[in-house]
Image (cartoon, rainbow, N blue to C red):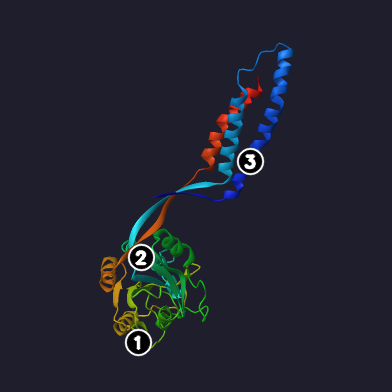
Amino acid sequence: MIHLTFVTPLAGLVALLGAAPLLVLFAVSDYAESVRSALSVAEPRFSRSVTAVAIVAVAILVGLAAAQPVLAKADVQRVRSDAEALFVIDTSRSMLASNGASAATRLDRAKAEAVRLRAKLPELKVGVASMTDRTLPHLFPSADRDLFRATVDDAVGIEQPPPIAYLNTGVTTFAALTAIVTRGFFTPSVSHRVAVVFTDGETRPFDASGLGLVLRRSPGVRPIFVHVWHPNELVYSGGFPEPDYQPDQSSDAKLEGAARAARGKVFGEGDLAAAAKAVRSYMATGPTMAEERAEHEFPLSRILLILAAVPLLVLLVRLSR
């Protein structure tokens, strides 16, 4: 589907300025004709009507260019109307850990995993949130995959915004996930909800059964944990490991406990096919709706200005004779 929109439609009124030279043209043309007759000077090869058309063409084309028309090609896709997913990315400082000072951090890998998993679920609206000792939304569930990628790339960063317990590598708590149920992260009418949590699993002690009770509260949110972690990773600062950080070797068990309490599942880093299959299994089947998503935009102002040069050249030739 193709749409034409104008960014600054009122600026198109500049086309009215073309009326001024037209009025001048017709006011003096009769007088110029009588002068040429008295002096026995031949009529110019270009008629007055040609000049008028050229002036109007320049005015219209410049006016349209000033209105900044944009041709947008949109793709219409079918998305579930009763199901949404929320991708929650752990942004605590422990997600800075990596296998070396120049290696990709856990956060870098988690963001890349989130974008790849999103591409495997085109039929769902997916939102983005970050988690430390609190969970905060960055994008509410949307069918726009480009917007999802831009949000993950630009809005998700270590401690952005900072946790309450600032400057501490061990601030993450899975108890913060209760916010996705109690604070309107999903559309209220949606009955099938999944939260995909990308985390290293290095959480402070929390009440797993209490978390499970909240996540199972009707209509319920099924959690899927993607464990982005390696036992030998360290947090580097200035090229050197931070002495206060050590990988939590019990992170696997903590994730399994949270998943078990909330009827969820845990997948390893890179196991995205299985994670996508689990999401679809929880979502089952349901009604869909048409969702329009902008694919490409083509600004037309420059083309219109180039076209305006043609009648302008006619005017210049006319004036030179």
| Residue occupied by mark 1 | 213
| Residue occupied by mark 3 | 16
**How far separated are the C-alphas under marks 1 and 2?**
28 Å
Q: Position of residue 188 (x, y in %)?
A: 40, 76
**How far separated are the C-alphas under marks 2 and 3?**
54 Å
Q: Position of residue 194 (x, y in %)?
A: 34, 74
| Residue occupied by mark 2 | 113
Instruction: Name the front one of labels 2 and 3.
Output: 3
Q: Nearer the viewer, residue 47 or 74?
A: 47
107, above or below 6, in the image:
below
Dot 2 amino acid type: Glu
Q: Nearer the viewer, residue 38 or 140?
A: 38
Dot 1 amino acid type: Leu
Q: Position of residue 37 (x, y in %)?
A: 71, 14
Q: Determine crowd level at label 1: few under 14, some 14-19, many 20+ residues with C-alpha closer than 10 A.
A: some
Q: Nearer the viewer, residue 246 or 43?
A: 43
Verify CB contact (< 8 Å) between mark 1 and mark 3. no
Q: Residue at x 35, y 64 (%)?
A: 118
Q: Determine crowd level at label 2: few under 14, some 14-19, many 20+ residues with C-alpha closer than 10 A.
A: some
